[in-house]
Amino acid sequence: MTVLLREAIGDRLRHARTNQRRTLREVSRTARVSLGYLSEVERGRKEASSELLAAICEALDLPLSELLHHVASDIGAVQQTPDTVPDTVPDGRSAHERGKLEGGRVLPTTLSDDLSDLRLQPMLTHRLTSKIGEPPKAVVAA
């Protein structure tokens, strides 16, 4: 599976923005980039220049080095095949125990941070969920 850098960067930028519960409009204004172009970058349709990436990262309060580190980890996880994964790791777990084997690829059970909507791994079967709290109980009037 070929991984495009622009798609991996776009996924991470969108993930950072949505985790902050910010809109494209807010980030595009802060970064001084058009809303449409930011959307294209997030969808992996456009290659962002280093200046543009720096502006978007600054608008998201996300260090560029952190973005690139996570992107490299994501690409490495996608490109990892059973031939490149040792049969066991130092703690003694097998490749199958630390990840799922699907379609001839070892998929880590978790990627860096909590990215669960990564477009680059369509074979990923689990989804991270969070529980915000119990809904208030209905009050019955007597």
Image: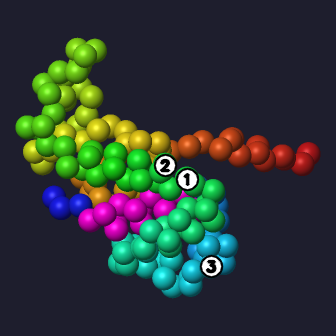
* Secondary structure category for the residue under label 2: helix
* Secondary structure category for the residue under label 3: loop
Q: Which quarter shows the N terminus?
A: bottom left
Residue type, label 1: Pro
Above or below — where is 15 with respect to 134?
Answer: below
* Neighbourhood count class around disc 2 (C-alpha, 10 Å): few under 14, some 14–19, many 20 upward: few
Position of residue 37 in the picture relative to residue 137 (left or right): left
Q: Residue 22: x and y, percent?
A: 64, 65
Q: Quadrant of residue 32?
A: bottom right
The magenta-colored residue range is: 4-17
Above or below — where is 72 with respect to 26?
Answer: above
**How many dots with numbers?**
3
Q: Residue at x 62, y 73 (%)?
A: 31
Q: Can you identify the residue that label 2 sits on? A: 66
Q: Residue at x 47, y 42 (%)?
A: 113
Which of the two discs, 3 and 2, labels the residue nearer the N terminus? 3
What distance separates the C-alpha of mark 3 from that of mark 2? Answer: 21 Å
**Decide: marks 3, 1 in contact (CB < 8 A)?**
no
Above or below — where is 23 with respect to 2?
Answer: below
**Decide: marks 2, 1 in contact (CB < 8 A)?**
yes
Residue type, label 3: Arg
Which of the two discs, 3 and 1, labels the residue nearer the N terminus? 3
Q: Can you identify the residue that label 3 sits on? A: 32
Residue 116 in view of the camera? no
Q: Can you identify the residue that label 1 sits on? A: 63
* Neighbourhood count class around disc 1 (C-alpha, 10 Å): few under 14, some 14–19, many 20 upward: some
What distance separates the C-alpha of mark 3 from that of mark 1? Answer: 17 Å
* Secondary structure category for the residue under label 1: loop
Position of residue 16 in the picture relative to residue 118 (left or right): right
